[in-house]
Image: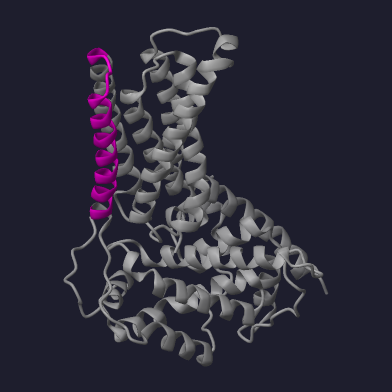
């Protein structure tokens, strides 16, 4: 059973912060943003593979969260809720981009120079980044949500709109492929 | 070997850390989301559910009242009312399971997909059971039978769409996780409401008529709800 928390406790959960934000607290928004924005940004960066696009989508995501805050149900898990909004924003943007008559990449957007994250400090990190990027989108997303964003299988399934079994399978197959890709990248001179 | 132990060798990898957005972007978002911030709490999932059930009950009551004031045989009205009570219970259970709790805490996707597909099938079976007879399909598909079925189907569709529209407005922007599926459930609610209510008012109890006019309207509303829900129910 989940522990019962007092409203507005000293160490509020993101759900409590969201409720205070809905009640009109700017401080609660700041704290909520501090806690969830890096996860959302990491997820969008993985989807778009481009920093500026990811930041644009982060703004779109928070604009939607702001507009829809009155329809946030008390107690609903906040992170999957926001990640699902971010994912839908990405899909909408990709659909709009692919409908334009331009020379598009596989992702449906103009080819962009690869974003090099300054956090990449060694060969293994770089190999892992490349291996993750080489995964099919479905596997990459499932691994990103469960391994990097820290969602449970059930929460990731909710964000992706599929069953838990399907997500487990994607993660498992993704790991297998990741191993092979890592081996390939680390073997290269 | 369990999946966890299979994946042990990946635990120690330097997985990408969450990545902070630039300060300019953070500042812009903060400005956008805190400007004129005030208390803005909408209705709870339970309150929206009650409103949805109210819309459904009001529409059913209105159609039934119109049916009872017309020259319908008493037996036909009574059997229609039994149908309303039975399907009303089913509808309440479906809505409570699918929309009565916040997204992320609702019934599983598999359960809701099963509801959206199996309930219309069960309704077709119920219509076959409720039918008083069946004319040959050739006879049904020509002349007055077909004309009446089209008319009745259109009325079912319009009433169902009005109910589904009302329910959809109750749950507008509330489900970023499975808006299409929730929309299909809303369509199912509208379709069931109109089909059982029209069942009381409709003078025909012939099987082809019930399937074509009342059953297909329900299926159409489920599909329509799925498409519209993706736009309306998503934030």
Residue beneath the point at 66% across and 62% down: A95
Between B190 and A179, the residue placed more toward the observer is B190
Majority secondary structure of the magenta segment?
Answer: helix
Q: How many numbered circles are shown?
A: 0
Image quarter where the C terminus of chain B lies is: bottom left
The picture places residue B17, in percent across and down from the top left corner, at 53, 77
Q: Which residues are magenta?
A: B47-75
Residue beneath the point at 27% across and 53% down: B48
Q: Which quadrant of the structure image shows residue B156?
A: top left
Tell me if A100 is positioned left or right of B39 in this view.
right
Residue beneath the point at 34% across and 28% down: B196
Observer able to see residue A16 = yes
Looking at the picture, does residue A10 appear above or below residue B144? below
Q: Is residue B209 magenta?
A: no
The picture places residue A140, in percent across and down from the top left corner, at 62, 61
Q: Which quadrant of the structure image shows residue B189?
A: top left
Residue beneath the point at 30% across and 29% down: B87
The picture places residue A108, in percent across and down from the top left corner, at 72, 65
Looking at the picture, does residue B22 appear above or below residue B211? below
The picture places residue B12, in percent across and down from the top left corner, at 55, 68
Q: Is residue B69 magenta?
A: yes
């Amino acid at each position: 059973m989940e522990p019962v928390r007092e409203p507005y406790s000293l160490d509020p959960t993101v759900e409590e912060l969201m409720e205070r934000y809905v009640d009109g607290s700017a401080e609660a928004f700041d704290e909520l943003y501090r806690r969830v924005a890096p996860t959302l940004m990491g997820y969008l960066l993985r989807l778009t593979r481009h920093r500026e696009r990811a930041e644009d989508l982060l703004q779109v995501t928070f604009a939607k969260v702001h507009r829809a805050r009155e329809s946030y149900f008390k107690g609903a898990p906040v992170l999957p809720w926001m990640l699902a909004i971010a994912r839908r924003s990405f899909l909408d943007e990709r659909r709009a981009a692919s409908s334009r008559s331009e020379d598009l990449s596989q992702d449906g957007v103009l080819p962009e120079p690869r974003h090099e994250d300054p956090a990449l400090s060694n060969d293994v990190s770089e190999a892992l980044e490349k291996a993750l990027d080489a995964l099919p989108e479905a596997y990459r997303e499932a691994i990103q949500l469960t391994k990097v964003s820290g969602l449970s299988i059930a929460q990731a399934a909710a964000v992706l709109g599929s069953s838990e079994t399907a997500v487990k399978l994607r993660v498992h197959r993704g790991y297998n492929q990741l191993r092979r890709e890592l081996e390939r990248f680390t073997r290269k001179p | 070997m369990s999946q966890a132990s299979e994946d042990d060798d990946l635990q120690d990898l330097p997985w990408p850390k969450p990545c902070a957005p630039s300060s300019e972007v953070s500042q812009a978002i903060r400005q956008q989301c805190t400007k004129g911030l005030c208390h803005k709490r909408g209705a709870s999932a339970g309150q929206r559910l009650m409103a949805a059930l109210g819309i459904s009950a009001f529409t059913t009551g209105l159609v039934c009242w119109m049916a009872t004031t017309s020259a319908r045989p008493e037996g036909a009205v009574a059997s229609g009312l039994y149908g309303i009570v039975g399907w009303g219970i089913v509808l309440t259970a479906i809505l409570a399971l699918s929309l009565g709790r916040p997204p992320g805490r609702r019934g599983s996707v598999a359960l809701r997909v099963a509801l959206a597909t199996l309930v219309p099938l069960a309704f077709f079976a119920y219509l076959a059971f409720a039918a008083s007879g069946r004319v040959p399909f050739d006879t049904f598909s020509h002349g007055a039978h077909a004309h009446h079925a089209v008319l009745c189907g259109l009325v079912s569709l319009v009433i169902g769409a009005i109910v589904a529209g009302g329910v959809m407005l109750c749950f507008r922007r509330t489900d970023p996780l499975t808006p299409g599926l929730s929309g299909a459930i809303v369509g199912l609610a509208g379709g069931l409401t109109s089909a059982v209510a029209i069942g009381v008012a409709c003078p025909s109890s012939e099987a082809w008529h019930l399937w074509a006019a009342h059953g297909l309207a329900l299926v159409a509303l489920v599909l329509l709800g799925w498409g519209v829900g993706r736009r309306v129910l998503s934030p």
